[in-house]
Image: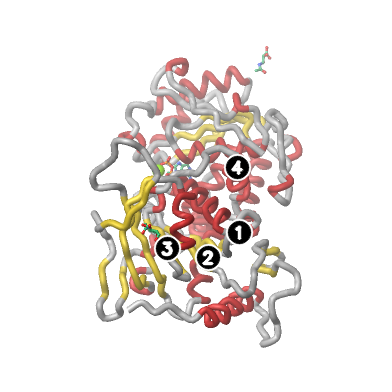
Amino acid sequence: MVIFCNPRIFDAIFLLVVCFLLDQCSPHNHVDEDDGFDFQQGTKFKLVVDEAKAPRYLLYDVNPGEGFNLRRDVYMRIAVLIKSLNEDAPWILVLPPWSGIYHWRSRDIEAQNKIPWSAFFDLSSLRSFVPVMEFEEFLKISREPVIEELYYLQHYKEGWDKWEEKMDRRPCMHNPYSYDSEANLWRGWFFGYDRAVGARKLECLSVMGHAGFVKPFLLTNTSARSVMLDRAETLLHDRYGDSVFWQCRRSMRFAKHLRDIADNFRAEYLDSTDEGDKAIIEEDWQSMKRNHGDAIGGPYLAVHLRRADFVRAREKYVPSVKSAAKQIKHLAKQLNLTKIFVATDAPQTEYDELKGYLTDFSVYQFEPTLEARAKYKDGGVAIIDQWICAHARYFIGTRESTFSFRIQDEREILGFAPETTFNCLCKKKESECEQPTRWLIKY
Ligand SMILES: Nc1nc2c(ncn2[C@@H]2O[C@H](COP(=O)(O)OP(=O)(O)O)[C@@H](O)[C@H]2O)c(=O)[nH]1
Ligand SMILES: *[C@@H]1O[C@H](CO)[C@@H](O)[C@H](O)[C@H]1NC(C)=O
Ligand SMILES: *[C@@H]1O[C@H](CO)[C@@H](O)[C@H](O)[C@H]1NC(C)=O
Ligand SMILES: [Mg+2]
Protein backbone atom coordinates (compact mmCIF):
# COMPACT_ATOMS: atom_id res chain seq x y z
CA MET A 1 0.00 0.00 0.00
CA VAL A 2 1.24 3.44 -0.78
CA ILE A 3 1.26 5.72 2.21
CA PHE A 4 1.32 9.35 1.29
CA CYS A 5 2.33 11.34 4.28
CA ASN A 6 0.51 14.26 5.63
CA PRO A 7 2.10 17.46 4.32
CA ARG A 8 2.57 18.76 7.84
CA ILE A 9 4.77 15.85 8.63
CA PHE A 10 6.81 16.86 5.65
CA ASP A 11 7.11 20.38 6.87
CA ALA A 12 8.40 19.01 10.11
CA ILE A 13 10.81 16.86 8.18
CA PHE A 14 11.85 19.84 6.19
CA LEU A 15 12.67 21.83 9.27
CA LEU A 16 14.73 18.89 10.33
CA VAL A 17 16.60 19.21 7.06
CA VAL A 18 17.43 22.75 7.85
CA CYS A 19 18.41 21.89 11.38
CA PHE A 20 20.49 18.97 10.34
CA LEU A 21 22.31 21.04 7.82
CA LEU A 22 22.83 23.92 10.14
CA ASP A 23 23.96 21.47 12.72
CA GLN A 24 22.71 23.70 15.48
CA CYS A 25 19.22 22.58 16.21
CA SER A 26 17.20 24.12 18.91
CA PRO A 27 13.42 24.07 18.88
CA HIS A 28 13.23 27.75 18.04
CA ASN A 29 16.08 27.88 15.68
CA HIS A 30 13.87 28.36 12.70
CA VAL A 31 14.78 29.16 9.14
CA ASP A 32 16.49 32.51 8.96
CA GLU A 33 14.43 35.56 8.23
CA ASP A 34 16.20 36.07 4.96
CA ASP A 35 15.59 33.87 1.97
CA GLY A 36 18.45 31.47 2.28
CA PHE A 37 20.11 29.43 4.89
CA ASP A 38 23.46 27.89 5.42
CA PHE A 39 23.51 24.54 3.77
CA GLN A 40 27.11 23.87 4.43
CA GLN A 41 29.55 25.89 6.42
CA GLY A 42 30.09 29.12 4.64
CA THR A 43 27.77 28.22 1.81
CA LYS A 44 24.75 30.22 1.07
CA PHE A 45 22.01 27.93 -0.13
CA LYS A 46 20.26 29.88 -2.83
CA LEU A 47 16.93 28.12 -3.00
CA VAL A 48 14.18 30.42 -1.83
CA VAL A 49 12.06 28.17 0.29
CA ASP A 50 8.45 28.88 0.87
CA GLU A 51 7.97 27.21 4.22
CA ALA A 52 4.45 26.20 3.36
CA LYS A 53 5.82 24.22 0.48
CA ALA A 54 8.31 21.61 1.55
CA PRO A 55 10.69 20.58 -1.19
CA ARG A 56 10.45 17.42 -3.20
CA TYR A 57 13.44 15.28 -3.99
CA LEU A 58 14.57 14.03 -7.36
CA LEU A 59 17.00 11.14 -7.52
CA TYR A 60 18.40 9.56 -10.62
CA ASP A 61 20.77 6.88 -11.80
CA VAL A 62 22.46 6.00 -15.05
CA ASN A 63 23.00 2.80 -17.00
CA PRO A 64 25.51 0.82 -14.90
CA GLY A 65 28.07 0.50 -17.71
CA GLU A 66 28.55 4.24 -18.16
CA GLY A 67 31.77 5.90 -17.08
CA PHE A 68 32.51 8.95 -15.01
CA ASN A 69 32.40 11.57 -17.73
CA LEU A 70 29.17 10.55 -19.37
CA ARG A 71 27.67 10.54 -15.89
CA ARG A 72 28.77 14.14 -15.51
CA ASP A 73 26.91 14.85 -18.71
CA VAL A 74 23.72 13.18 -17.44
CA TYR A 75 24.01 15.22 -14.23
CA MET A 76 23.78 18.33 -16.40
CA ARG A 77 20.61 17.17 -18.13
CA ILE A 78 18.97 16.51 -14.75
CA ALA A 79 20.32 19.66 -13.11
CA VAL A 80 18.83 21.77 -15.90
CA LEU A 81 15.53 19.98 -15.30
CA ILE A 82 15.78 20.77 -11.58
CA LYS A 83 16.44 24.38 -12.41
CA SER A 84 13.30 24.47 -14.47
CA LEU A 85 11.23 22.62 -11.84
CA ASN A 86 12.27 25.20 -9.26
CA GLU A 87 10.55 27.88 -11.28
CA ASP A 88 7.33 26.22 -10.15
CA ALA A 89 8.05 24.39 -6.92
CA PRO A 90 11.04 23.64 -4.71
CA TRP A 91 12.85 20.52 -5.80
CA ILE A 92 16.18 19.27 -4.53
CA LEU A 93 18.47 17.13 -6.64
CA VAL A 94 19.81 14.17 -4.68
CA LEU A 95 23.26 13.37 -6.04
CA PRO A 96 23.79 9.69 -6.93
CA PRO A 97 26.81 8.36 -5.03
CA TRP A 98 29.63 6.99 -7.16
CA SER A 99 29.66 3.22 -6.94
CA GLY A 100 30.73 0.35 -9.10
CA ILE A 101 32.11 2.53 -11.89
CA TYR A 102 33.42 0.17 -14.51
CA HIS A 103 36.82 1.85 -14.86
CA TRP A 104 37.52 2.32 -11.19
CA ARG A 105 39.05 -0.90 -10.09
CA SER A 106 42.01 -0.01 -7.95
CA ARG A 107 42.97 -2.63 -5.41
CA ASP A 108 40.49 -1.65 -2.79
CA ILE A 109 37.16 -1.93 -4.59
CA GLU A 110 35.16 -1.08 -1.49
CA ALA A 111 36.91 2.26 -1.29
CA GLN A 112 35.67 3.03 -4.80
CA ASN A 113 32.07 2.65 -3.68
CA LYS A 114 29.48 5.00 -2.21
CA ILE A 115 31.69 7.97 -2.88
CA PRO A 116 29.91 11.27 -2.21
CA TRP A 117 30.00 14.04 -4.77
CA SER A 118 31.96 16.27 -2.40
CA ALA A 119 34.94 13.96 -2.93
CA PHE A 120 35.12 15.19 -6.53
CA PHE A 121 33.14 18.40 -6.86
CA ASP A 122 32.72 21.68 -5.07
CA LEU A 123 29.18 21.39 -3.74
CA SER A 124 28.80 25.05 -2.93
CA SER A 125 29.56 25.77 -6.55
CA LEU A 126 27.00 23.22 -7.75
CA ARG A 127 24.51 24.82 -5.39
CA SER A 128 24.81 28.17 -6.97
CA PHE A 129 23.17 26.59 -9.98
CA VAL A 130 20.59 24.31 -8.36
CA PRO A 131 19.86 22.91 -4.90
CA VAL A 132 21.64 19.61 -4.50
CA MET A 133 22.17 17.26 -1.61
CA GLU A 134 24.20 14.13 -1.05
CA PHE A 135 22.37 10.82 -0.93
CA GLU A 136 23.61 10.30 2.65
CA GLU A 137 22.00 13.59 3.61
CA PHE A 138 18.80 12.46 1.96
CA LEU A 139 18.88 9.24 3.97
CA LYS A 140 19.49 11.14 7.19
CA ILE A 141 16.45 13.32 6.74
CA SER A 142 14.18 10.53 5.53
CA ARG A 143 12.21 8.76 8.19
CA GLU A 144 12.97 5.48 6.50
CA PRO A 145 15.39 4.59 3.72
CA VAL A 146 12.68 4.57 1.14
CA ILE A 147 12.24 6.31 -2.18
CA GLU A 148 8.56 6.75 -2.79
CA GLU A 149 8.39 6.34 -6.52
CA LEU A 150 10.87 4.89 -8.93
CA TYR A 151 10.49 5.23 -12.68
CA TYR A 152 12.64 3.05 -14.84
CA LEU A 153 13.05 4.83 -18.15
CA GLN A 154 13.12 2.82 -21.32
CA HIS A 155 12.67 3.28 -25.03
CA TYR A 156 9.59 2.27 -26.98
CA LYS A 157 9.40 -1.44 -27.65
CA GLU A 158 8.16 -0.86 -31.17
CA GLY A 159 10.96 1.59 -31.93
CA TRP A 160 10.09 4.76 -33.81
CA ASP A 161 9.79 6.15 -37.35
CA LYS A 162 9.30 9.76 -36.48
CA TRP A 163 11.05 11.40 -33.56
CA GLU A 164 8.55 13.12 -31.31
CA GLU A 165 8.47 13.88 -27.62
CA LYS A 166 6.30 11.39 -25.81
CA MET A 167 6.14 9.32 -22.67
CA ASP A 168 3.89 6.50 -21.56
CA ARG A 169 3.66 4.11 -18.68
CA ARG A 170 4.44 0.79 -20.24
CA PRO A 171 5.23 -2.75 -19.11
CA CYS A 172 8.91 -3.10 -18.28
CA MET A 173 10.96 -4.53 -21.11
CA HIS A 174 13.79 -5.10 -18.69
CA ASN A 175 13.61 -4.59 -14.98
CA PRO A 176 16.68 -4.98 -12.81
CA TYR A 177 14.68 -4.45 -9.61
CA SER A 178 12.89 -7.16 -7.71
CA TYR A 179 10.02 -7.00 -5.32
CA ASP A 180 10.64 -7.81 -1.67
CA SER A 181 7.20 -8.79 -0.47
CA GLU A 182 8.25 -8.97 3.14
CA ALA A 183 9.25 -5.33 3.24
CA ASN A 184 6.82 -4.27 0.52
CA LEU A 185 9.67 -2.61 -1.30
CA TRP A 186 11.41 -2.81 -4.63
CA ARG A 187 15.04 -3.77 -4.16
CA GLY A 188 17.90 -3.12 -6.48
CA TRP A 189 21.35 -1.62 -6.88
CA PHE A 190 20.61 1.86 -5.49
CA PHE A 191 24.13 3.22 -5.88
CA GLY A 192 25.60 0.24 -4.07
CA TYR A 193 23.31 0.60 -1.07
CA ASP A 194 21.37 -2.46 -2.17
CA ARG A 195 19.08 -3.71 0.53
CA ALA A 196 19.69 -0.74 2.77
CA VAL A 197 17.31 1.18 0.50
CA GLY A 198 14.07 0.40 -1.28
CA ALA A 199 11.43 1.96 -3.47
CA ARG A 200 7.78 1.89 -2.54
CA LYS A 201 6.51 1.88 -6.08
CA LEU A 202 8.11 1.08 -9.41
CA GLU A 203 6.90 1.69 -12.91
CA CYS A 204 8.48 1.65 -16.32
CA LEU A 205 8.15 4.70 -18.49
CA SER A 206 8.78 4.60 -22.19
CA VAL A 207 10.12 7.97 -23.10
CA MET A 208 11.47 9.83 -26.06
CA GLY A 209 12.33 13.39 -25.28
CA HIS A 210 14.42 16.05 -23.63
CA ALA A 211 14.88 16.14 -19.88
CA GLY A 212 12.60 19.17 -19.65
CA PHE A 213 9.81 17.14 -21.20
CA VAL A 214 9.27 15.16 -17.99
CA LYS A 215 8.71 18.33 -15.98
CA PRO A 216 4.88 18.37 -16.26
CA PHE A 217 4.82 14.70 -15.34
CA LEU A 218 6.83 15.36 -12.17
CA LEU A 219 4.75 18.38 -11.27
CA THR A 220 1.31 16.99 -11.88
CA ASN A 221 1.19 13.24 -12.49
CA THR A 222 2.92 12.43 -9.25
CA SER A 223 2.82 14.00 -5.85
CA ALA A 224 5.45 11.75 -4.29
CA ARG A 225 7.95 13.51 -2.10
CA SER A 226 10.84 11.53 -3.51
CA VAL A 227 10.97 10.44 -7.11
CA MET A 228 13.77 8.56 -8.75
CA LEU A 229 14.43 8.31 -12.47
CA ASP A 230 16.62 5.36 -13.34
CA ARG A 231 18.30 5.16 -16.72
CA ALA A 232 18.23 8.94 -16.80
CA GLU A 233 20.59 8.94 -19.77
CA THR A 234 17.48 8.11 -21.81
CA LEU A 235 16.56 11.80 -21.52
CA LEU A 236 18.30 14.19 -23.86
CA HIS A 237 19.85 17.57 -23.16
CA ASP A 238 17.23 20.30 -23.46
CA ARG A 239 19.56 22.54 -25.42
CA TYR A 240 23.09 21.28 -25.75
CA GLY A 241 25.57 24.12 -25.67
CA ASP A 242 23.27 27.03 -24.84
CA SER A 243 23.97 29.51 -22.04
CA VAL A 244 22.02 27.53 -19.43
CA PHE A 245 23.97 24.43 -20.36
CA TRP A 246 27.15 26.41 -19.83
CA GLN A 247 25.99 27.87 -16.53
CA CYS A 248 25.46 24.35 -15.33
CA ARG A 249 28.82 23.28 -16.70
CA ARG A 250 30.59 26.24 -15.11
CA SER A 251 29.04 25.37 -11.77
CA MET A 252 30.59 21.89 -11.93
CA ARG A 253 33.83 22.94 -10.32
CA PHE A 254 36.17 20.24 -9.21
CA ALA A 255 36.75 19.94 -5.48
CA LYS A 256 39.38 22.35 -4.23
CA HIS A 257 41.57 19.64 -2.68
CA LEU A 258 41.97 18.00 -6.09
CA ARG A 259 42.62 21.24 -7.93
CA ASP A 260 45.27 22.06 -5.34
CA ILE A 261 47.13 18.83 -6.00
CA ALA A 262 47.01 19.42 -9.74
CA ASP A 263 48.11 23.04 -9.29
CA ASN A 264 51.08 21.98 -7.19
CA PHE A 265 52.08 19.48 -9.84
CA ARG A 266 51.82 22.15 -12.54
CA ALA A 267 54.00 24.51 -10.54
CA GLU A 268 56.57 21.90 -9.60
CA TYR A 269 57.07 20.16 -12.94
CA LEU A 270 55.47 22.17 -15.70
CA ASP A 271 56.31 25.82 -14.92
CA SER A 272 52.62 26.48 -14.90
CA THR A 273 50.88 28.87 -12.53
CA ASP A 274 47.51 30.57 -12.82
CA GLU A 275 49.17 33.98 -13.07
CA GLY A 276 51.71 32.92 -15.68
CA ASP A 277 49.10 30.99 -17.65
CA LYS A 278 46.67 33.92 -17.47
CA ALA A 279 44.11 31.52 -16.12
CA ILE A 280 43.11 32.96 -12.78
CA ILE A 281 40.17 31.21 -11.17
CA GLU A 282 37.58 33.44 -9.65
CA GLU A 283 36.00 32.29 -6.43
CA ASP A 284 32.52 32.44 -7.88
CA TRP A 285 32.06 30.84 -11.30
CA GLN A 286 29.25 33.26 -12.03
CA SER A 287 31.60 36.21 -12.20
CA MET A 288 34.16 34.39 -14.33
CA LYS A 289 33.66 35.33 -17.95
CA ARG A 290 36.53 34.95 -20.36
CA ASN A 291 37.20 35.65 -23.99
CA HIS A 292 38.82 33.12 -26.23
CA GLY A 293 42.53 33.65 -26.14
CA ASP A 294 42.65 35.26 -22.70
CA ALA A 295 44.35 32.16 -21.31
CA ILE A 296 47.68 31.08 -22.72
CA GLY A 297 48.36 28.10 -20.49
CA GLY A 298 51.56 26.59 -19.17
CA PRO A 299 54.51 25.80 -21.46
CA TYR A 300 53.59 22.19 -22.10
CA LEU A 301 51.67 20.06 -24.51
CA ALA A 302 49.01 17.93 -22.84
CA VAL A 303 47.84 14.70 -24.33
CA HIS A 304 44.91 12.59 -23.29
CA LEU A 305 45.74 9.16 -24.56
CA ARG A 306 42.71 6.98 -23.98
CA ARG A 307 43.65 3.32 -24.21
CA ALA A 308 42.26 0.41 -22.13
CA ASP A 309 38.82 -0.56 -23.46
CA PHE A 310 39.02 2.07 -26.24
CA VAL A 311 41.77 0.17 -28.04
CA ARG A 312 39.22 -2.41 -29.07
CA ALA A 313 35.95 -0.51 -28.77
CA ARG A 314 37.22 2.41 -30.90
CA GLU A 315 39.63 0.49 -33.02
CA LYS A 316 38.85 2.67 -36.02
CA TYR A 317 40.02 5.83 -34.28
CA VAL A 318 42.55 4.91 -31.64
CA PRO A 319 46.13 5.04 -32.90
CA SER A 320 48.85 2.62 -31.95
CA VAL A 321 51.18 3.87 -29.24
CA LYS A 322 53.85 4.37 -31.88
CA SER A 323 51.61 6.37 -34.15
CA ALA A 324 50.41 8.48 -31.22
CA ALA A 325 54.03 9.19 -30.30
CA LYS A 326 54.78 10.32 -33.86
CA GLN A 327 51.88 12.74 -33.82
CA ILE A 328 52.81 14.07 -30.39
CA LYS A 329 56.42 14.56 -31.40
CA HIS A 330 55.44 16.41 -34.52
CA LEU A 331 53.12 18.71 -32.58
CA ALA A 332 55.55 19.44 -29.79
CA LYS A 333 58.20 20.40 -32.33
CA GLN A 334 55.79 22.60 -34.19
CA LEU A 335 54.75 24.32 -30.98
CA ASN A 336 58.28 24.60 -29.66
CA LEU A 337 57.27 22.85 -26.47
CA THR A 338 59.75 20.63 -24.73
CA LYS A 339 57.48 19.42 -21.97
CA ILE A 340 54.75 16.90 -22.57
CA PHE A 341 52.15 15.93 -20.02
CA VAL A 342 50.45 12.62 -20.63
CA ALA A 343 47.12 11.68 -19.08
CA THR A 344 46.33 8.11 -19.86
CA ASP A 345 44.64 4.97 -18.67
CA ALA A 346 47.24 2.90 -20.51
CA PRO A 347 49.03 0.13 -18.68
CA GLN A 348 52.58 0.94 -17.57
CA THR A 349 54.11 -1.03 -20.46
CA GLU A 350 52.33 1.16 -23.03
CA TYR A 351 53.29 4.34 -21.20
CA ASP A 352 56.92 3.21 -21.13
CA GLU A 353 56.74 2.43 -24.83
CA LEU A 354 55.38 5.93 -25.51
CA LYS A 355 58.12 7.55 -23.44
CA GLY A 356 60.65 5.51 -25.35
CA TYR A 357 59.61 7.27 -28.56
CA LEU A 358 59.77 10.71 -26.97
CA THR A 359 63.30 10.79 -25.62
CA ASP A 360 63.92 14.29 -27.02
CA PHE A 361 61.30 15.67 -24.66
CA SER A 362 60.56 15.78 -20.97
CA VAL A 363 57.54 13.58 -20.49
CA TYR A 364 55.42 13.81 -17.35
CA GLN A 365 52.62 11.83 -15.87
CA PHE A 366 50.80 12.36 -12.60
CA GLU A 367 51.74 9.30 -10.61
CA PRO A 368 50.04 9.20 -7.26
CA THR A 369 51.50 7.27 -4.39
CA LEU A 370 49.45 4.34 -3.17
CA GLU A 371 48.29 6.45 -0.24
CA ALA A 372 47.24 9.28 -2.51
CA ARG A 373 45.35 6.94 -4.79
CA ALA A 374 43.57 5.43 -1.81
CA LYS A 375 42.70 8.87 -0.54
CA TYR A 376 41.58 10.54 -3.76
CA LYS A 377 40.27 7.38 -5.44
CA ASP A 378 40.52 6.61 -9.13
CA GLY A 379 37.99 9.34 -9.81
CA GLY A 380 40.07 11.95 -8.01
CA VAL A 381 43.19 10.95 -9.90
CA ALA A 382 41.27 11.23 -13.17
CA ILE A 383 40.19 14.74 -12.18
CA ILE A 384 43.76 15.75 -11.34
CA ASP A 385 44.80 14.58 -14.82
CA GLN A 386 41.95 16.53 -16.38
CA TRP A 387 42.79 19.70 -14.50
CA ILE A 388 46.43 19.53 -15.58
CA CYS A 389 45.40 18.95 -19.21
CA ALA A 390 43.02 21.88 -18.96
CA HIS A 391 45.92 24.27 -18.26
CA ALA A 392 48.27 23.28 -21.06
CA ARG A 393 49.27 25.65 -23.82
CA TYR A 394 47.90 23.08 -26.22
CA PHE A 395 45.71 20.05 -25.72
CA ILE A 396 45.19 17.02 -27.87
CA GLY A 397 42.77 14.30 -26.83
CA THR A 398 41.27 11.06 -28.00
CA ARG A 399 38.43 11.01 -30.45
CA GLU A 400 34.99 10.28 -28.98
CA SER A 401 36.26 10.16 -25.42
CA THR A 402 34.00 11.98 -22.97
CA PHE A 403 37.08 12.29 -20.73
CA SER A 404 38.65 14.44 -23.48
CA PHE A 405 35.37 16.35 -24.02
CA ARG A 406 35.23 17.42 -20.39
CA ILE A 407 38.79 18.76 -20.66
CA GLN A 408 37.71 20.72 -23.70
CA ASP A 409 34.78 22.29 -21.78
CA GLU A 410 37.15 23.17 -18.96
CA ARG A 411 39.45 24.98 -21.38
CA GLU A 412 36.51 26.90 -22.81
CA ILE A 413 35.70 28.08 -19.30
CA LEU A 414 39.30 29.12 -18.70
CA GLY A 415 39.38 31.14 -21.93
CA PHE A 416 41.71 29.26 -24.25
CA ALA A 417 41.71 29.82 -27.97
CA PRO A 418 39.66 27.01 -29.57
CA GLU A 419 42.55 25.98 -31.86
CA THR A 420 44.49 24.94 -28.77
CA THR A 421 41.63 22.86 -27.42
CA PHE A 422 39.57 20.99 -29.99
CA ASN A 423 42.16 18.56 -31.21
CA CYS A 424 42.35 14.82 -31.28
CA LEU A 425 44.85 12.20 -32.24
CA CYS A 426 44.21 10.39 -35.48
CA LYS A 427 44.36 6.73 -36.29
CA LYS A 428 47.34 7.39 -38.54
CA LYS A 429 48.40 10.62 -40.18
CA GLU A 430 47.19 13.72 -38.42
CA SER A 431 45.84 15.45 -41.50
CA GLU A 432 43.54 12.57 -42.17
CA CYS A 433 40.98 12.67 -39.43
CA GLU A 434 37.99 14.61 -38.37
CA GLN A 435 38.60 16.94 -35.45
CA PRO A 436 36.19 17.42 -32.55
CA THR A 437 33.17 19.67 -32.85
CA ARG A 438 33.89 23.06 -31.36
CA TRP A 439 31.32 23.48 -28.63
CA LEU A 440 32.16 27.05 -27.74
CA ILE A 441 31.17 28.57 -24.44
CA LYS A 442 28.12 30.84 -24.28
CA TYR A 443 27.44 33.27 -21.47
N1 LIG B 1 43.58 9.01 -14.36
C1 LIG B 1 43.13 8.82 -15.60
N2 LIG B 1 42.08 8.02 -15.79
C2 LIG B 1 41.63 7.87 -17.05
C3 LIG B 1 42.24 8.51 -18.16
N3 LIG B 1 41.58 8.16 -19.26
C4 LIG B 1 40.58 7.35 -18.87
N4 LIG B 1 40.61 7.17 -17.53
C5 LIG B 1 39.70 6.36 -16.71
O1 LIG B 1 38.78 5.71 -17.55
C6 LIG B 1 37.50 6.32 -17.46
C7 LIG B 1 36.99 6.60 -18.84
O2 LIG B 1 35.63 6.58 -18.85
P1 LIG B 1 34.75 7.85 -19.17
O3 LIG B 1 34.91 8.81 -18.08
O4 LIG B 1 33.40 7.32 -19.46
O5 LIG B 1 35.33 8.48 -20.51
P2 LIG B 1 35.34 7.81 -21.98
O6 LIG B 1 35.03 6.36 -21.82
O7 LIG B 1 36.72 8.07 -22.46
O8 LIG B 1 34.30 8.49 -22.79
C8 LIG B 1 37.69 7.61 -16.68
O9 LIG B 1 36.60 7.98 -15.95
C9 LIG B 1 38.89 7.27 -15.81
O10 LIG B 1 38.48 6.57 -14.68
C10 LIG B 1 43.38 9.33 -17.90
O11 LIG B 1 43.96 9.92 -18.79
N5 LIG B 1 43.77 9.46 -16.61
C1 LIG C 1 -0.15 12.47 -16.91
O1 LIG C 1 -1.44 12.96 -16.66
C2 LIG C 1 -2.17 13.32 -17.82
C3 LIG C 1 -3.45 13.98 -17.37
O2 LIG C 1 -4.12 13.19 -16.44
C4 LIG C 1 -2.41 12.08 -18.66
O3 LIG C 1 -3.11 12.42 -19.83
C5 LIG C 1 -1.07 11.48 -19.02
O4 LIG C 1 -1.23 10.29 -19.73
C6 LIG C 1 -0.23 11.22 -17.78
N1 LIG C 1 1.11 10.82 -18.20
C7 LIG C 1 1.66 9.64 -17.89
C8 LIG C 1 3.00 9.36 -18.47
O5 LIG C 1 1.12 8.83 -17.18
C1 LIG D 1 59.48 28.01 -32.75
O1 LIG D 1 60.80 28.43 -32.73
C2 LIG D 1 61.34 28.74 -34.02
C3 LIG D 1 62.82 29.01 -33.89
O2 LIG D 1 63.17 29.38 -32.62
C4 LIG D 1 60.55 29.92 -34.57
O3 LIG D 1 61.02 30.24 -35.86
C5 LIG D 1 59.08 29.57 -34.64
O4 LIG D 1 58.31 30.66 -35.06
C6 LIG D 1 58.58 29.09 -33.31
N1 LIG D 1 57.24 28.58 -33.47
C7 LIG D 1 56.25 28.87 -32.63
C8 LIG D 1 54.92 28.24 -32.92
O5 LIG D 1 56.38 29.58 -31.64
MG1 LIG E 1 32.75 5.93 -21.19
Which of the 4 quarters of the picture holds residue 196?
bottom left
As measured in the structure, the alpha-carbon distance from the residue carrying label 3 to the one carrying label 1 is 30 Å
Mark number, residue 221: 3
As measured in the structure, the alpha-carbon distance from the residue carrying label 2 to the one carrying label 4 is 23 Å
The residue labelled by disc 2 is 134
Q: Earlier in the sequence, mark 2 or mark 1?
A: 1
- Check disc 1 and report its element: helix, strand or loop: helix
Q: Earlier in the sequence, mark 3 or mark 4?
A: 3
Q: Earlier in the sequence, mark 4 or mark 1?
A: 1
Residue 134 placement (x, y as % from top left): 53, 65
Report the amino acid beneath label 2.
Glu
Mark number, residue 246: 4
Mark 3: few, some, or many residues within 10 Å (few <14, many ≥20)?
Answer: few
The residue drawn where x is 46% and y is 26% is: 425
- Check disc 3 and report its element: helix, strand or loop: helix
* Ligand 1 has an atom within 8 Å of the beta carbon of the residue at disc 2: no
Report the amino acid beneath label 3.
Asn
Tell me if label 2 and label 1 are in contact, CB under 8 Å: yes
From the image, which quarter does the N terminus lie in?
bottom left
Q: In the picture shown, does residue 95 fall above or below 409?
A: below
Q: Earlier in the sequence, mark 3 or mark 1?
A: 1
Mark number, residue 300: none
* Ligand 2 has an atom within 8 Å of the beta carbon of the residue at disc 3: yes
As measured in the structure, the alpha-carbon distance from the residue carrying label 3 to the one carrying label 4 is 30 Å
The residue labelled by disc 1 is 123
Question: Ligand 2 appears in which quadrant?
Answer: bottom left
As measured in the structure, the alpha-carbon distance from the residue carrying label 4 to the one carrying label 1 is 17 Å
